[in-house]
Amino acid sequence: MLNEEAVILPASVRRERMLEMITDRQFVRVAELSDVFGISGVTVRADLDALDSSNVVRRVRGGAMARTQGINPEQSFEESLGASSAEKALIGQAAAALVTSGMSVVIDVGTTTAAIARALVARTDLEQVTVITNGLNIALELEGAKSDLTVIVTGGTLRRLQHSLVDPMATILLERLHTDLAFIGCNGVDVLHGVTNINLPEAEIKRRMIASAERPVVVAAGSKLGQTHLVRVADLAEIGSLITGPSARADAVAKLRRAGTDVIQVT
């Protein structure tokens, strides 16, 4: 009989948990993963093949081994908070300035998007703005807003590392929305590979957020330009603008602009 948890786990969440098991144990068998997640061996092999194609595990006979070389470990929200904090505040202010009264706005999870939330809280001129977020910490930040903000939380499965909500449930709301703006965080922006992220479940939610918005805006500290990570979130052509900070290298900004990306660099 299938595990109750396995019945509702979307593939992206299940694969991330498989990756965690394989990383912890270095080797896990197909039969063990089948028992843990209550799925067939065929489904397990398909999941492992997908992880192998992303170069995060190595498929071997009977299971999969950890492929740790070249993988960037995901930092928690708290670990990322201090990095480039002044730059993130500048990006947050520039992004918040795009919001006008009557808008509907999606705010993704992350430390840079949290800076957007703090900048919105400080504004006193906004009326009838609806903010949709999958970040529990961002929703709490917005509680102190001085303007007229309505905050909607997507619901879903909690990822404690980022205080984020992912599938199931999160996309059910996002699929039904058409918003004015979406502010999307990421781990990398590259001309060839587009917008990328470290973890699978959040990448899927980011895609839904981008699809829901009239103008998707990616926010990224300068250090993320030219970086490529595990999961592609979007091609550059799918985003409306990129807001980055003073640490972004001039050559990286120039390449993105030549590729047709609207880059807003705050200083």
Image (cartoon, rainbow, N blue to C red):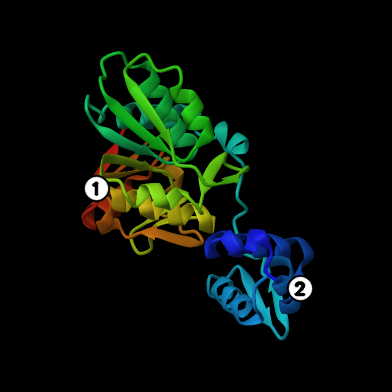
Instruction: Indicate whether 120 appears above or below 47.
Output: above
- Which quadrant of the view contains residue 65? bottom right
Residue 225 at x, y = what percent?
40, 49
Q: CA distance from mark 2 to mark 1?
A: 44 Å
- Of residue 205 and residue 78, the one placed in the foreground of this image is 205
Residue 255 at x, y = what percent?
29, 55
Mark 1 lies on a secondary structure that is: loop
Image side of residue 244 versus residue 17, left or right: left
Q: Residue at x 34, y 52 (%)?
A: 175
Q: Residue at x 52, y 44 (%)?
A: 165
Report the residue marked by disc 2.
32
Would residue 251 be seen by someone viewing this image from the given angle?
no
Q: Amino acid at mark 2?
A: Glu
Would residue 190 be seen by someone viewing this image from the given angle?
yes
Image side of residue 211 versus residue 140, left or right: left
Which quarter of the image is occupied by the N terminus? bottom right
Q: Earlier in the sequence, mark 2 or mark 1?
A: 2
Report the residue marked by disc 1.
240
Residue 10 at x, y = what percent?
53, 61
Q: Residue at x 46, y 31 (%)?
A: 114
Q: Are marks 2 and 1 in contact (CB under 8 Å)?
A: no
Which quarter of the image is occupied by the C terminus? top left
Q: State the residue lying farthest toward the bottom.
A: 61
Image side of residue 106 versus residue 39, left or right: left
Residue mark closest to the camera, 2 vs 1: 2
Q: Amino acid at mark 1?
A: Gly
Mark 2 lies on a secondary structure that is: helix
- Of residue 118 and residue 104, the one placed in the foreground of this image is 104
